[in-house]
Every structure is written in structure tokens, then in C-alpha cells.
Image: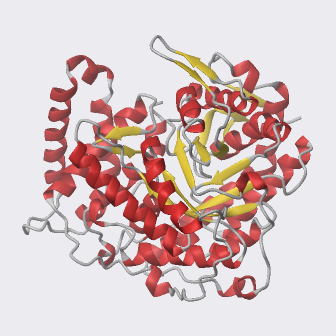
Amino acid sequence: MTKYDITGPATPHSADVLTKEAASLLADVHHEFNERRRQLLSLREERQAEFDHGVRPDFLPETRSVREGEWMVDPVPSALADRRVEITGPVDAKMVINALNSGAKMFMADFEDATSPTWENLVEGQYNLLEAQLGTLQLETPRKSYRLGEETATLLVRPRGWHLPEKHFLVDGRPVSGALFDFTLYMCHGGRSSLEMGSGPFFYLPKLESHLEARLWNDVICYVSDRLGIPLGTVKATVLIETITAAFEMEEILYELRNHSSGLNAGRWDYIFSFIKKFRNHAQYVLPDRSQVGMTAPFMHAYTELGVATCHRRGAHAMGGMAAFIPNRRDPEVTERALAAVAADKRREAEAGCDGTWVAHPDLIPVAMSEFDRILGGRPNQIGRQRDDVAVTAEDLLNPEIEGGAITEGGVRTNVSVGIRYMASWLSGTGAAAIDNLMEDAATAEISRSQIWQWVRHGARLDNGMPVTAPMVEKIAAEELSRIREAVGEDMYRTGRFQRACEIFSEVALEDEFVEFLTLPAYRDL
């Protein structure tokens, strides 16, 4: 038996989650797979060094036979056939209950970008999902009681990415992988319960950068399934295509997970972040204001089209991206314009062939549902629609041109303000934060800070001709911090960790060396 140590404090249900069986299995999974994980992370670094020196990603010659072969992914069970609208959010009890009751077809419970990885959030989140699978999850507050309805959305779970550690669970004195922690514990509890309830353990797998990382996930799934007596092929996983390198390996990723695949998802926010990060040293890839980088941008449109064509060719779901708008009932004009934009976005996805889409707020479900209902009618999906008209090249995936794109002072200020406010929320234990009518998470914060780094690095100029410099950003940060202090009041400012959030944001946005993920240095503060 592999030796392990749990250093996190007791939580209300830690004894139910961190059972001897679950902890021992997690230690064994770490022992079996952690070295491969570390090697794959090293390969990421080697590839980044190549990009820094001018190499560009391309479709892999060594896997041509996979792309040209005749194969299909295994069919998904009926519980996953109709995914036309999925809602996403963190794993706290209130969110889980409301999302499962929301009327969406699916709920993706997110241990990754929407959850601040405090020990209590992670452990209690596992317990919430177990109770949700059993149908017994409930929450009492002074103002309201929360109960699960008779009909609920199908649950999918997103563990953390390969790069993130879990410092409160040690094996041989070293932190385990956050991904293995989240996946293994859910399989032990909620996963097995889902089988008993007639569904199955369903997952989203984030931030993969290659088919080799998908192969590792497949081997982990097989190993844990075998140890728990879960039939192979029962687990189904949707991979988020949210890195530019993964976009070149969609076929190969599906192939590696073909017995466990339930499709690919266009993870749009992380994809923008990846595009900036991978080509950060090259001025031709400088992007305009975040608000101008939409799904009609050439590189974004190309990867969405390729995703639909690839998935349908292999019999898999092609899932659209996130609508992050939060309706503002106090400003109906803003809400009306935003809902029209959401409807147009979902109409474009449905017409392009997507089988479903994501929303961040329950009020967006009817808008998204109506657009997919219009295309799908009574069909559960449109996997049978082959996109033989799609012919995406490497140049298309790498095309950064955005017509009319510009960098504005407002864009700089928004990135700084959102970055600070989101990091303060994350440090305070909340990983999904409503900011300026948008649901911000770690992915959108990554865009904010990486754009600042990119603009400063390359001396990008605002639309008024002024260069974006570190002193300019520091001045704006001080101004935004002052505005936040005035808006929230002294007590909340003092307890809300805004000053520390500003320090971390400045570190990841302005240091000479690009920090791979802002959550890595920030995690030390949790």
C-alpha cells in the first residue's frame, strides 16, 4: 500500500469523502501515473521553447494514419444523447441544486476554473456531488430552503488540469495531482452512485495540449474503473479544446479516448488565452481588446468549424462555447442587447452543426434552448450532419487578423480591473465571480493578465497612439484599486484581499518571465 498523508483540516464531511478506500486508491493512482504526468508537463515546456524560437504547430505527420483511418468513437448512453444546453458552475451546494433544477439538459460541476481550490471547497464539493447523485442534496439558509426537483439535469464533472497540484494530500511527501485527486474521489463516491442511479460517471477533461495527454487520461480511466469494478467504457468524457496545440490534434484526442469519448467542446476563453500564451514572444500575434476577440475572429471560427467536422466524422458530440452574460434586471436595455447577442451566438453555433452549447446563468437557458430547438427539433443531436464542406488549414488556425481590431485605454483598464477583482474573489474562496454583468472565472482572468503582458512586452499602442507600458498599467491598477475601495467600503476592502490580488495580478502581468498559469502563484496564498 502506498503511503499517504492528508494535511488539510477536517471539514464537515471529510470523513465521508476521504475514506480509507478512497485515499488508498488515490495514493495508488498517483504512484502509477504521476511520473508520466510530469514528463508530459516537461514536453509542454519543450514545445513552448520551440514556439518561442519561431516554430509553429502543425498537423502531426506521425499520426496521419489516425486522421485518415476509418474508426468511430463508441456510442454514448441515452443519458448523454441530448446535450443541447449545458449549464456550468462551481460545486457548492446552492449552485449544484440550482443548476440541476435549472431546466438545462446537463450541468457541468466544475472543480477547475469556476472553483477556488480551497481544501473545504474541494472536499465538500465532492460530498455535494455524491448527495446530488443520490438525490438527497439539500441546503437550508435563513432565507430559503433548497431541494432537488423531480427532474434534474444530467451531471458531468470537470476535474482540475494536469498542471495543478493538490498540496493537502501528499504521497511520499509530494503533492498529488489536482486532476487525479478530483477524478479519483468522484469515481469512488459520486461515480459509483451514478451507476446505481442508472446513469454513469461523466466528465469534462480540461486544458489538454496533446493526444499523449488524452492517452494518459484514458489509461487513468481504465485503471480506476478496473479497481472499482466499473465496466470499461462506462465512463464518458468530453475533452475541452482550449489550447491551440490541441486544435491540431482533435482527431488523435478522440482516437485515444474512443472507448470513453463523448465529444469535444470549444473552450473559447482558455483558447484565446492559449493563443496569446503560446505565441507571446511574437508581435504578429498581438490581439486587440478582449471584447473584440469573438467567435467570428478567423482563428476562432476556424477551430470551431474544424471541431464540428472532426466530431461528426467520428460519431461524437461537438459542443459550442460559453455564454457568460449575467442578466441585469435593473438595466433592461443592457439585458435586451446582451440577450440578442447571446441568441445570435447560439444561432451561429446551432447552424454550424454544434450539438449543444454552454451557458453560465439560468436565465440564458431559454434563449439558448430556443436556438437549438429550432435546428434540432425532435432530434437529440445533429451528429449525423457531416461537414464535408469544412477544409481548415494550419494557416487558418493561426490567423490572428481581426478586422477593425484595436487596443484602447478602456480595454487596458477593463483587463486590470477584472483581473484584480477576480483574483480577490478567488483568494476569498469564490472561483466564479459576477463582474460587470459577466460571469468571470480563471480562464477570463488569464486572458486579462496575458493581454496586458503581451501588450507591454511588444510596446503595443493604443488607438490614440500611446504605447502600453508597465508604468501605465501600474498607474491604472492604482486607480482601479482606489475605485474598488470606494465602491465596496473600508470593511469589505480590508477583508476582501484586494491589495494582495493587485500584487498577484501585477506579478503575472508585468514580470519579464511569463507565468504559465496565474493560479499557480496564487495557490500559495490559499
Residue 456 position in % (x across, y down): 23, 61
* Residue 513, visible in the rendered structure: no
Residue 451 position in % (x across, y down): 30, 60
Residue 65 position in % (x across, y down): 75, 87
Horizontal arrangement in the rendering, residue 345 relative to residue 245 (left or right)? left
Q: Compare residues 129 and 15 and report the one nearer the observer.
A: 129
Q: Compare residues 131 and 163 and report the one nearer the observer.
A: 131
Q: Compare residues 221 and 320 and report the one nearer the observer.
A: 320
- Residue that protrudes farthest toward the top in the picture: 142
Horizontal arrangement in the rendering, residue 353 relative to residue 63 (left or right)? left
Which quadrant holds residue 205? bottom right
Q: Residue at x 55, y 53 (%)?
A: 85
Q: Residue at x 52, y 85 (%)?
A: 392
Q: Is residue 235 above or below residue 349?
A: above
Q: Quadrant of the N terminus?
A: top right
* Number of marks present in the image shown: 0
Which quadrant holds residue 102? top right
- Name the image colouring: secondary structure
Residue 198 position in % (x across, y down): 83, 42
Which quadrant holds residue 9? top right
Q: Residue at x 24, y 69 (%)?
A: 458
Q: Compare residues 111 and 165 and report the one nearer the observer.
A: 111
* Residue 455, visible in the rendered structure: yes
Q: Is residue 115 above or below residue 374?
A: above
